[in-house]
Image: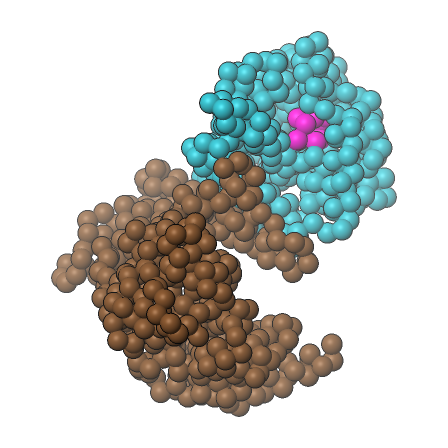
Amino acid sequence: MADLERFRSDTRSWLEKSAPKSLFGARGDALEGVWGGKKAVYANPDRKRWLEIMAEKGWTAPGWPAEYGGGGLSPEQAKILAGEMRYLRLPAPLVGFGLTMIGPTLIQFGTEEQKREHLPRICRGEIRWCQGYSEPDAGSDLAALQCKAEDDGDHFLVTGTKVWTSYADLSDWIFALVRTDPKAKKQAGITFLLIDMESPGVTVRPIQLISGASPFCETYFEKVRVPKANVLGKINGGWTVAKALLGHERNMIADAFGGSDRGMRRTLAEHARRYLPSVGGKLSDPLFRDQIARVELDARAFALTVQRARDGAKAGHKPGPESSLFKVYGTELNMRRHELLVRMAGFQALGWEGEGFEEDELALTRDWLRSRGNAIEGGTSEIQRNIIAKRVLGLPD
Amino acid sequence: MQLVLTEDQEFIARTAEDFASERSPVSRVRELRDRADPIGFSRELWKEMAGLGWAGILFPEELGGAGLGMAELATVLEALGRRLAPEPFLSTVLLAGQALRLGGSESQKKSWLPGLITGEKILALAYQERGSRYDLACVETRAEPDGDGFLLSGEKIQVLDAQVADAIMVSASSSGGISLFLLPKGAPGMAIARLRRVDGRGAANLRLDRVPAARSDLVGSIGEGGGLLERVVDLATVGLCAEMLGAMSEAFDQALAHLKTRVQFDVPIGSFQALKHRAADMFIEVELCRSAVMAAARAVDEGSEDAAKLISLAKARCSDAFILITNEAVQMFGGVGMTDEYDIGFYMKRARAAEMTFGDAAWHRDRWARLSGY
């Protein structure tokens, strides 16, 4: 106990002394910030320095083993560090799929060479990773993926298309699921491959959404040579690795839900008063007023459920069934909220760009359009309900 | 506020669950209804529950209570709610009992609370009127000054357990405000008409025709009963929500079991995706309600400023969720869900009655909006 207290005060003084002054109070949310990689551009040079300072200490990945560039901290110490960073309102020095998805999976399944090659570069923010899972014909049914990897001795030749690869155009490496045995049962013929995006034969095309530009891309592989040393786990054993990684991804999303209040900048009532009449502070339209209350009640009940899950975990209870509703409920709530915001704004929510609309009205329109994807990405609401039915409720296939 | 049961609360919950499953199966409710029981619950079982300390949970230890809070009482009510147990927690412990605890004179407390806590005395609180809907302040029953006392005249509806109460607390308008009077059973001019409700819960309409009341029968100060009334109705609302949570959980469990065992077209019907998705939605509703009820109970215990909003959150969501779940459950049971023989109909009827008790979902959404400033 005394050691942890010493660690806390040492950590706080070190952070106060070492962090660039401009970054105190610059804390954003989990997906903003520095992603690193060869193509990284730093608007604020202090962000680059902060990355270097923390990477040197191993604190971009505080819980990872020190020999691979991590901080080697115990879970209690890592929690203390996170708390001190929050207290000082310091941003995370590095974010991205390297830290949250492929890194933990490498630690779990990687060979010694793979860990030594990839983990330190993730920790230093030198290499940025993206995820190659979905394909045009393999979305919810991921195991139906067709991107093939032909055996070429000590290499594979990879040919196929991946879609919805976030930030593929800014990434240095991709972890991809490929089919190595077309004759085996769907899940049984899949291999988890680590591929250098600079390999000949890799092309990337950004995807425009109905809401405008997006980080999503299509990634094409045309006979790309990938050494067999880049197989993570066993050949044809990729589905196991993929499932483990999805678990890490789910933790990342759960953390993002529990934390910030993105998009809650404008309250529904404030927004309503801007566009709708009120008398003595009370909104005149009883239908909108009731709908605002409905969304707020649901948001509060949802927040209380997130808190209940967290309180249970803190008390040492096994995770309850309530956390399986987070993704499906949280996303649909967000979508309903945007529907209501847009309907209350009326014509002012119809702006695409330019004159006649305020900046935040244009942003609302884009946010509404983008929100329509929330119930699709990261596991559709239909799949989520199937999962709840099967895993929580025990309903038969 | 920790939305997790403490070890003590878990112990109370387990005790309540064990007792309820052994001593209070849902078949009791059916039997009480079938014989048109005049009391509407079991006095013996009520005394047993009191013996376990449940009637006294909220009362101070000096009076024989446990000095605990709504968080504890909610676990008991949830277990009993699972079986639709009709014992008089809402009327006696929460409405009238809390009015006495928070606003009664020393003499009133001494006369009534010890007997309430042992399960011997039953009390009722008559506040609702035909034209008032859920507005506590809308009171036409008058308390006219008569010498040193008053004469009460008016009509009250849907008074829980008035048919068996040893005393009935009545809200009446006087001195420009609302006053609460505690009237003994059989008071002259008081007529009680038992109601046979679809949910079987014991209730009666009350007719007051110049019923005499002394100053000493006032609960709290004259003309200032409105605040006390609102407070105890809020407490009773939390209790009702805990019952609703238990009942909706049980209805959902029964529907789920049916989905797994009912075979049609050679497969369990739970394998049909449409039903899986509806079941998933029912599950989500129960979990959200659980969080809201726990938060409301704890906010009350902590004296939080947020309590009234959280109570409205709990009642609005429990009202809608309980109805959704029971309507869906009847549908999933198919033809047998419509039979009286099956228990699920009792849950659906309870859901409807609970919806309209202490404010429906729309009323509470309105209160939420009002408390939120819009």
Toward the viewer: A373 or B26?
A: A373
Residue pictured at 39% horizontal, 52% vertical: A183
Toward the viewer: A247 or A272?
A: A247
From the viewer's perspective, tell me whether residue A367 is left or right of residue A234: left
Above or below, B270 against B71 in this view is: above
Q: Which residues are magenta?
A: B80-89
Quarter of the image holding residue B253?
Answer: top right
Name the spot of residue A208 as percent of width and height, x first. Answer: 22, 60
Query: In the rendered picture, chain A carries what hue?
Result: brown
Query: Please, which colouring scheme is shown?
Result: by chain
The answer to if A138 sits in the magenta stretch is no
From the viewer's perspective, tell me whether residue A348 is left or right of residue B74: left
Quarter of the image holding residue B143?
Answer: top right
From the viewer's perspective, tell me whether residue A294 is left or right of residue A75: left
Name the spot of residue B299 as percent of width and height, x first. Answer: 62, 50
Name the spot of residue A58 as percent of width and height, x first. Answer: 53, 84
Q: Decide if residue A63 is in sight here.
A: yes
Name the spot of residue A131 as percent of width and height, x first. Answer: 38, 65
**Quadrant where the image shows the N terminus of chain A:** bottom right
Q: Residue furthest left?
A: A355
Query: In the rendered picture, chain B carries what hue?
Result: cyan
Toward the viewer: A223 or B28?
A: A223
Q: Decide if residue B86 is in sight here.
A: no
Residue pictured at 56% horizontal, 43% vertical: A392
Toward the viewer: B211 or B119?
A: B119
Above or below, B99 against B329 in this view is: below
Residue pictured at 37% horizontal, 59% vertical: A179
Our reading of the magenta stretch's main secondary structure is loop
Q: Residue furthest bottom?
A: A17
Residue pictured at 76% horizontal, 51% vertical: B7
Above or below, B253 against A164 in this view is: above
Quarter of the image holding residue B222?
Answer: top right
